[in-house]
Image: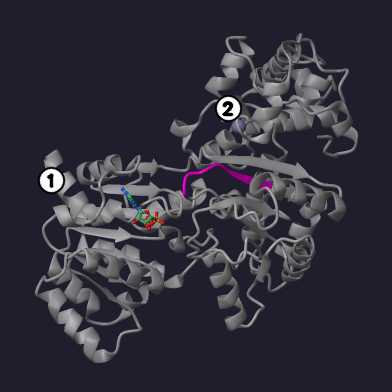
Amino acid sequence: MIDSSAYDRALAELGYSAFRAGQRETVETLLQTRRALLVAPTGGGKSLCYQLPALLLPGTTLVISPLIALMQDQVSALQARGVAATFFASTLDAAESRARLDALSRGEYKLAYIAPERLALPGFRERLKRLGCPLVAVDEAHCISEWGHDFRPEYGQIGELLAELAPPHVLACTATATPIVRDEIIVRLGLPADTPQLVRGFARPNLALRAAEVGGSRERAARVDALLSEALFAPGAGRGAAIIYSPTRRMAEEESERLASAGWKATVYHAGLPADARARAQAAFTRGEAEIVCATNAFGMGIDRGDVRAVVHLGPPGSIEAYYQEVGRAGRNGGDALGLLCWQQNDLPLRRRLLEAPGGDAQSDPEIVEHRWNLFLELIRWADGAACRHDAILRYFGDEAETLHGCGRCDVCVAIDAVDEVSVEEATQLARKLLSGVARLQNRFGLKQVVRLLHGESEDRLERMGLTQVATFGILRERSADWIQRALSRCVTAGWIGFSGDLHPVVRLTDDGVAIMRGQRAARWLPPSDAASKKPKESR
Ligand code: ADP
Ligand code: ZN
């Protein structure tokens, strides 16, 4: 067993004075159970979780990483701290590559980073086998998943490599949370099914998240302007910066012009601009000459500006993962920051068409289209949801431990806090009625059937089971079926209703849901307004 002063020494060797939340536990779990999957956001400090064990364990740790630039950065940082590290990638010339291989064979490195395509080279794997590595870390492990957004065929060989090397420890790291991807990582790396999945560090309590359904571009512009004044105070006030993400290049340009004419120091960044224009925009933003950058999702990798006070999305990105990664660029220095996601009903058919378009990024594979579509729907459900936005995101990532039972900052928490006692009581009663419908049908039926039961619509199966005679039948008869449907999805986002079964998901109450139904706890949520059931429109 490794004593705790060894941890502290290794930490200091890497140049850190303390662990971040979860890092120590991850290292301990890895050393104890020998296999682990670490799920943490980008920038969450995953690399320490293999670098530190690499220092503690005898021999050379291998790190498989798909991004040469990041690999180089990490190796330089380690070398600067006096840690023997190197990397192998196609960018090396033959002589350099040979010299490094020889040093590797002599056991001179504590860490060797490897681009996955190297694994196909004859002889390379043989050498690795002779090394007897104590730990293999697979960074960006979701690249192994065909479901993921970043599939890399070269990652397919890693499972074989692990089988050949049979290293004592394996750590897979990813920022992708979808359960289907996580499970696929475990299967394709050949890890045991009970490999611990550590989900860490998704909480960003300094971010106040908001989502607004807007009717059109004018309403959206008003929202953006209000948010910018709140976050940055006034054009040129030097109170930090904002990033505005646009779904299209054209929209980014138009928004940048609109804001510039309002006096903001705005610049534009997207992949359609020449390289020098992109470099200029990025430099202006990093150096503080521009206070707002209007960009597509091409902007982001490696931006180093801690004082981003606001991240606005003019339209929804493809998933909660993508959204959270982008909005997470606000408030990096720990200061208060705002996130605003604008969306419209129209975004749904738009996204669907984009996914189905031939040559689109789902490659017209119907299964992938469905998978991506569901990722998108999760984001829209979150945006339309009426429970704490912070908690709902953490639940999505499976990071329950960090939920706050209301962050007190997001638009939903603020709205709930403004509501009077009577309305809280009413909202709780409504939730109890909705949840009692779920309790009646749980583990047998899906949400649609719950709607019928609560709305009091007679139906064969309900009748056969005697459910048209129970008190819950028609308990929300005075509401529209559409309202009940919306309210139930809000209960899902709030974490009170869960699903089991893959093919035909059936509903069940979560522990929180049971507590609320039994009246042991008030339901902190905003039921949909009655108007919303006819015409989906934001009234705030
Ligand atoms: P990830 O791989 O999860 O995207 P990194 O490992 O690159 O994240 O870490 C992100 C940043 O956080 C790096 O700049 C790293 O130096 C820093 N960092 C990681 N752990 C600590 C720590 N315990 N104390 C201070 N800084 C840390
Ligand atoms: Zn909240």
- Residue with the mark numbered 1: 6
Determine the quadrant in which ligand 2 lies. top right
Q: Nearer the viewer, residue 150 or 161?
A: 150
Tell me where the magenta segment starts and ends, as one range: 333-340
What's the residue type where badge 1 is placed?
Answer: Ala
| Residue 201 place in picture, x, y as percent | 42, 43
Residue 406's mark? 2
Ligand 2 has an atom within 8 Å of the beta carbon of the residue at disc 2: yes
Instruction: State the residue in front, 306 or 522.
Output: 306
Where does residue 213 sit, x and y in percent of width and height?
A: 78, 44
Horizontally, residue 5 falls left or right of residue 285, namely: left
Quadrant assignment for the C terminus: top right
- Visible residue check, residue 2: no
Mark 2 falls on what kind of element?
A: loop
Q: Nearer the viewer, residue 312 or 490?
A: 312
Q: Are marks 1 and 2 in contact (CB under 8 Å)?
A: no
Give left or right: position of 304 versus 458.
left
Give the residue drawn at x 64%, y 26%: 444
On whether ligand 1 comes within 8 Å of the CB at mark 1, the answer is no
The residue positioned 12% from the left and 75% from the top of the image is 105
Q: Is residue 136 magenta?
A: no
Instruction: Identify the residue shown where x is 17% and y is 65%.
Output: 82
Label 1 residue SS? helix
The label shown at residue 275 is: none
For residue 338: magenta? Answer: yes
First reached walking from the N terminus: tag 1 or tag 2: 1
**With 33 as the anchor, is 144 left or right in this view?**
right
The amino acid marked with disc number 2 is: Gly
